């Protein structure tokens, strides 16, 4: 590892490494429901490589991809919003914390923070999924 490589970005918070792999795998998954375990493992490996061998710039590129997935999910009526909400909140919190670090990371993520705030608002406004079957217990009598 180069002595010139800044590692300060790694100290922000562990939530992205812990929460994003499963949420991102769900957003990338073609089917609704729980994402395939192989997809979750691949996402976890990608995050691990970025954290162990990557740079802040590479990490921010990955979080840009996650932001794009969240924004796309917010515009879709067929995507389950839970994974998008989790991923969006984690990335938004991360990007807000960049203000305390040296460098231009906070400024570089200004547009992403705005996009995430709008996407999260849309996702939170979605109505709860409709109940399957009769909604009133007496309707079967």
Image (tube, rainbow, N blue to C red):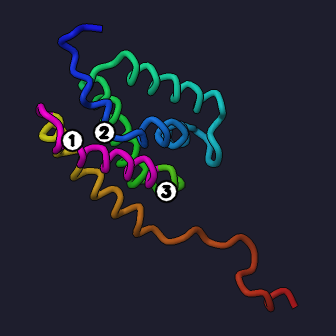
Which label number is shown at residue 117?
A: none
User: Which mark is first along the chain, 3 or 1?
Assistant: 3
Residue drawn at point x = 16 percent, y = 44 percent? 99
Report the front residue among 80 and 89. 89
Q: Residues within 10 Å of mark 2 (few under 14, many from 20)?
A: some
Q: Is residue 101 magenta?
A: yes
Identify the residue position indicated by label 1 in the image: 98
Q: Quadrant of the C terminus?
A: bottom right
User: Residue 122 location, x and y as percent?
Assistant: 36, 63
Report the front residue among 3 and 59. 3
- Asked if the residue at tag 2 contacts the one at tag 1, i.e. Cβ–Cβ closer than 8 Å, the answer is yes
Residue drawn at point x = 33 percent, y = 56 percent? 119
User: Residue 3 location, x and y as percent?
Assistant: 21, 10
Residue drawn at point x = 15 percent, y = 37 percent? 108
Identify the residue position indicated by label 3 in the image: 81
Report the front residue among 125 and 62. 62
User: Which mark is first along the chain, 2 or 3?
Assistant: 2
Which label number is shown at residue 12?
A: 2
Eyeballing the image, is 101 above or below 61?
A: below
Q: Quadrant of the N terminus?
A: top left
- Asked if the residue at tag 3 contacts the one at tag 1, i.e. Cβ–Cβ closer than 8 Å, the answer is no
Label 2, secondary structure: give it: loop
């Amino acid at each position: 590892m180069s002595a010139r490589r800044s590692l300060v970005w790694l100290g922000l918070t562990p939530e992205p490494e812990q929460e994003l792999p499963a949420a991102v795998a769900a957003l990338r998954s073609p089917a609704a429901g729980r994402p395939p375990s192989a997809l979750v493992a691949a996402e976890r490996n990608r995050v691990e490589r970025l954290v162990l061998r990557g740079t802040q710039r590479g990490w921010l590129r990955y979080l840009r991809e996650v932001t794009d997935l969240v924004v796309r999910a917010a515009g879709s009526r067929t995507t389950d919003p839970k994974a998008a909400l989790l991923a969006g909140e984690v990335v938004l919190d991360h990007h807000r914390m960049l203000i305390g670090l040296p460098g231009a990371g906070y400024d570089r993520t200004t547009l992403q923070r705005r996009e995430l705030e709008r996407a999260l608002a849309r996702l939170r406004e979605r109505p709860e999924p409709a109940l399957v079957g009769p909604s009133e217990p007496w309707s079967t009598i």
